[in-house]
Image: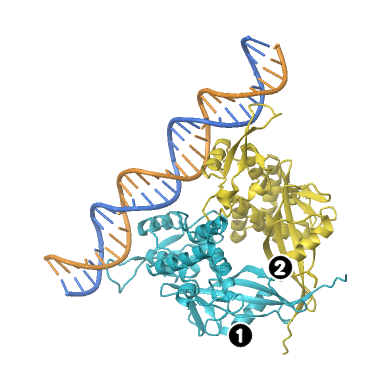
Chain colours: A yellow, B cyan, C blue, D orange
Amino acid sequence: MDHHVATCRAELVAVLTTLRNGMPEVLTLQNGRCLPAGPLETEHTSLQRGLRHWVEQQTGFRLGHVEQLYTFGDAALAQQDRLVRISYMALTRDGQTQGGWQSWYNYFPWEDRRTNACLTVLKTIEDRLKGWAGDQPARLERCNQAFGLNGENWNDDAVLERYELLWEAGLVPEAGRETVSQINGQPMLWDHRRILATALSRLRAKIRYTPAVFELVPEEFTLLHLQQAMEALSGRLMHKQNFRRLVQNQQLVEETDRYESGVQGRPARLYRFRRENSENCYLSGAKLPLGEIS
Amino acid sequence: MDHHVATCRAELVAVLTTLRNGMPEVLTLQNGRCLPAGPLETEHTSLQRGLRHWVEQQTGFRLGHVEQLYTFGDAALAQQDRLVRISYMALTRDGQTQGGWQSWYNYFPWEDRRTNACLTVLKTIEDRLKGWAGDQPARLERCNQAFGLNGENWNDDAVLERYELLWEAGLVPEAGRETVSQINGQPMLWDHRRILATALSRLRAKIRYTPAVFELVPEEFTLLHLQQAMEALSGRLMHKQNFRRLVQNQQLVEETDRYESGVQGRPARLYRFRRENSENCYLSGAKLPLGEIS
DNA sequence: AACTATTATGCTCTTATTGAGCATATATTA
DNA sequence: TAATATATGCTCAATAAGAGCATAATAGTT
C-alpha cells in the first residue's frame, strides 16, 4: 500500500468573550449560527496572525491576547481534502463593536444556575437523560456525574462533558433530533457549539487560578461588580462576605479613594487590579476560588 | 493582493511517559534526540490514528488513551510548505518495550527537587539568570516567579514557563548557546524539548485533580509506591503520613488482603485503585492534592 | 428630622483541611 | 534478644472555607 502525506487546510476559529449587563457573551456571525473563522492563508505568517486577520475582517474586532483551545481533526472529513480546525479563546472588556454578540446561555441554558429558571431546564434534561440511560448503570453514572444528579456535585468546568453527553443522547439539534431551543439551547453550524463548550470549560477553569476576570471588568470596579462577573462566568451565585474576604486576602486588588455613585444603598468603594502583584499570578499560586453558596 | 489558502502538512508528535525505578521516563528515538512523530497521511482516518500508526511503526508501542497537548504552527516555517505540529500525551505502566526510554530529568535537571543534587543545578541557573536579568525589574520578577527565587513559591506545573524563560535567556542549547548538559539539560531536535516541557506541565497538573497516577503504577501497590510515583512525577518529596491520610480520605483506593514481601521493615499492605468509584473522577471533584513537605 | 429600604462592610463561629511530628506495630537482620 | 527499618495510628496547631449576625452609610419617604 502506498503512503501519501496528506495535504490539508487549517481553519482558525475564534471564541471571543465579553461581559455585558451581567451576561457573558460571545462574538458570532450569521445571527449567532457560527463563530468567526477562516482558513490559514499563505499570507499569514503564523496561526495567530491568521486568526486575527479573519476576526478583524469578519467582525471588525482586533483581538488582544489569545489562548489556544483545541485542534479538531478527527471528524468524518473527506480523505483527499482534510481539514484541521484550530480553535482559540480571547477575552475583551469592550464588546461595543458592531456585530453579533450572543449570550453564552442561549447555547447552554442548563449552564446558568444563577436563577431558578434553569431548574425547569434541568428537570426536563434530567428526564430525557434518564430515558436515554434506561437501566444501563454506566450511562446512569455518567449522567449523574456530569449533571450533578443523585447526590453528585455539579462541576462548573464540565461544560464540554455535559454538551457531549447531550449530543450522545441525541438531545441537541446538531445530532439530528428535533429539540426545543429554550431547553436544549440554540444550535450552531458544524462543530462550532462544541468549540464554544470547550471555551466555556477552559475559561471557567481559568478564572479559578488566574486573574483572568480582570480582563473582563472595567479598570475600576466595586467588589460586587467583580463578584457578579465571576458569577456570570461560573454560572452560580456566591457568598458575598466570603468573596470579599478571599479577594482581599489574595492581595489581588487595591483600594482607590473613589466610590461608586448613583446607586441605592451605601456607596461601594472602587478597587483596582494590582497587576504588578500578579503579572503571572498563577505561578505564585494566587487563586480566586469561588466561595460557593450551597 | 491575492489570497491563497495555504496547504500544509500536519505532523503528529507523541510524548509517552512511564515510571521505572522511581524515575519518570519518556519514549524517544535517535538516542534521546527526538520524540516519535510522523506526518498525517491520507490513509489515516483521524489524527489519533495517525499518531498511533507512527508510534507503533517507529517504536513498536501500541498507545492506549491519549490526550492532546498543543498545536504548534507559528514557528518560522517556509511559507509554501507549512507545517502544523499537533502533539499528544499518553501514559503506560509497562515501558518494557525495546527502544529509547530516557529520564525526564535528563532534559530538565532543575525539575527534580527530590534530591540535593538539584541544588547545585539551581544555584548555577540562578546565577546565570541574574546575569541575564541584570537590573531589569520585569525580567527579575519573571525569574523569581518561575524558579521560586526571592521568597516566591516553586510551582511544579510551571515546567513550560521555566523552559521558555531559559530559552529566552539563551541558557538552553537549542537557543544556539554552548551549555553543559548536567546543568542545562540534554537538548532535542527541533522544538521537541518544548513539546516535552508542555507534557510535563500538563501531567503534573493532571495528577493533582485526576487519578492519572494509577495508570502508571501496577494493579496492586503499597501506599509508599503510590507516594513515590507522585513524587517522581511532581519532582518533590511529600509527607508520608499526610499522604496516606489524603489518599484514604478520597476513597480512591481499597485494601486487598495481601502484603508486600521481601523488603525490610514491617510489610506494607497492598492496595488497589477503586476504578468504579472514579471512572470520571475529575467530575466528582475527587482530588489527589500533594501533601507537600516544606 | 425621623424613619425605611438598601447595599456595603466588619466580625464571629463552626467545621474541614493541611502541615508537622510523636508513638506504636511488625517485620528483618545481626 | 537487640538493633534496625518500615508501616501505620493518632494528636495538635494553623489555616481556609461556609454560614450568618451586626453595624455603617447612603437615598428616598413620611
Residue A288 x/y as whole percent:
56, 47
Q: Chain of mark 1?
A: B
Name the kind of residue labelled 1 in the image: Gln
The one of B252 and B144 positioned closer to us in this rendering? B144
Residue that numbered label 1 is attached to: B57
> Residue A120, relative to residue B51: is it above or below?
above
Question: Is residue A239 among what the camera can see?
Answer: yes
The quadrant where residue A41 appears: bottom right
Relative to B17, B221 lies left or right: left
Between the residue at mark 2 and the residue at mark 1, the CA separation in whole angstroms equals 24 Å
Relative to A168, B234 lies left or right: left
The quadrant the C terminus of chain B occupies is: bottom left
- Contact, mark 2 vs mark 1 (Cβ under 8 Å): no
The quadrant the N terminus of chain B occupies is: bottom right
Give the residue at x 72% y 87%: A3
Name the kind of residue labelled 2 in the image: Phe
The quadrant where residue A238 appears: top right
Relative to B212, B45 lies left or right: right
Residue lying farthest to the front in this orientation = B135
Residue lying farthest to the right in this orientation = B1
Give the residue at x 53% y 39%: A245
The quadrant where residue B266 appears: bottom left
Query: How many labels, in total?
Result: 2
Question: Is residue A166 among what the camera can see?
Answer: no
Give the residue at x 37% y 58%: B239
Give the residue at x 67% y 70%: B72
Residue A86 x/y as whole percent:
72, 66
Q: Mark on residue A72?
A: 2
